Amino acid sequence: MSLAEQVKQAGVVGAGGGGFPAHIKVAGKADTVIANGAECEPLLYKDAAVMEHRVEEVVAGLQLVMDAVGARNGIIGIKAKKKRAVEAIRDACQGTSLRMHLLGDYYPAGDEYELVNAVTGRLIPPQGIPLQIGVVVSNVETLANIAAAARGVPVTRKTITLAGAVKNPVTITVPIGTTFREAIEAAGGLTTGDPVLCVGGLMMGQTTDDLDTPIVKTSSGAVILPRSHFVIERKLKPDPLKSRIGKSACDQCRYCTELCPRYLLGYAVEPHQVMRSLAFTATDKSYWNQMAVNCCACGLCTLYACPESLFPKEACDASKTEMRAANIRWTGAAPTRPHPLHDGRRVPIKMLMKKFALEKYDVPAPWQDIAVTPRQVILPLKQAAGAPNKPIVKKGDEITVGQPLGEISDKDLGAIIHAPIAGIVAEVTDDLIILTRQA
């Protein structure tokens, strides 16, 4: 069985948050494979913990992918400040052809477009993927899971960071389908009575007050803050209100554009022009929407750059939705080189922390071997880019650990889900499967 087929059967997806089924990348051809350990979301430490505690699997997975795609170069991108992870990777790479590329402590260092350019000097085509320029990029946890897949072990557990308003900031590994409530309780509980979760991070994560949200294959962790924190207040504003505020207050200062990471890489992304489109109806709307197409939704424009606390990122999101609905394709040119001030305008993580008033939460969240044994697990049928699983189990079935619970048609993109615990199928719906642990 090929590595791509082993990875497909194990249900491996991009574990950094993207969720792209890994077997597609492994089936490609490339001259360079980059292990993405940049981890630039403030307060999250999941990737560093994986590199420290699963380093042999990370390196083995990287070598397996290199062999599969025919790559000559294997490079681990990692921030220099992650000293224990750097040391672990350096030791594990001795005697191999692999090398590290040390990155600065800026945001968004882990963005694929940024990372590929930093490591190789190449620019991914607009709306493109790294494979188009001979590169495969995989999160370090994904590579560890690929190494496990080659041994026949499916993805049933997830490493996450719990940070912010928690008694014990920590990085732990839990069964997929565990709720954040159970994970937080196992890690010591909360320090706020009105918590809101930024699942996946403050910048690009999803915001929810539902502590019973299940941990899935793409969860990198959660930053928990009080509802009264100004970042949470901004995130929870209704979208129509965000649009009205921008329509009335944007003075076209260009800060959102001048600090946009994709604009600084040379791409035609100009959030200030998208904000300008809020003042129009149909006039020039398609033109302004073009300026949103290559936005990576990193959130810097909304949460950091705008001096008036407006919402350029959300305007870009809306524009991209409009373009997809109208089937409008990107028609602009590809970048030829980064902006001359690309390096000088990178945003340090410490500046983000200061801007967000997070200094009191800026403490380590080290890996701990905490046993989390949920009574039941909630497993969404869609945990990857592409189609959801079609359930192959029914209510009342007895399930063993690692057993496939769904299937993906050969013609569809997606990733199989497997049982993280032994138990009984308690419920099957169009959206999820619930397993109850055997007594």
Image: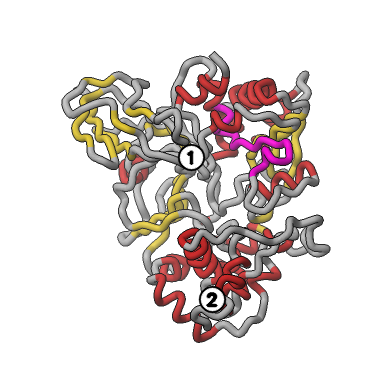
59 lies left or right of 117: left
Q: Which mark is residue 171?
A: 1
Residue drawn at point x = 32 percent, y = 32 percent: 390
Identify the magenta region.
129-144
In the picture shown, does residue 396 fall above or below 81?
A: above
Q: Out of 87 and 150, give the one closest to the viewer.
A: 150
Q: Secondary structure at mark 1?
A: strand
In the rendered structure, which disc, 2 or 1, sits on the residue that comes first in sequence?
1
Kind of residue indicated by mark 1: Thr
Residue drawn at point x = 56 percent, y = 54 percent: 42
Q: As drawn, which residue projects farthest toward the front?
A: 327
Whether residue 324 appears in this view of the structure is: yes
For the residues labelled 2 and 1, the Cα–Cα distance comes to 32 Å
Kind of residue indicated by mark 2: Ser
Residue drawn at point x = 43 percent, y = 46 percent: 168
Q: Residue 403, how many percent across, how many down?
A: 34, 21
Task: Provide the residue designation for mark 2.
Answer: 309
> Would you call the spot at circle 1 few (<14 residues within 10 Å), some (14-19), or many (20 or more)?
many
Residue drawn at point x = 46 percent, y = 24 percent: 10
Q: Secondary structure at mark 2?
A: loop
Q: Residue 125, how many percent across, how many down?
A: 70, 50
Q: Residue 18, how many percent across, how many down?
A: 52, 44
The C terminus: image quadrant? top left
Q: Quadrant of residue 262?
A: bottom right
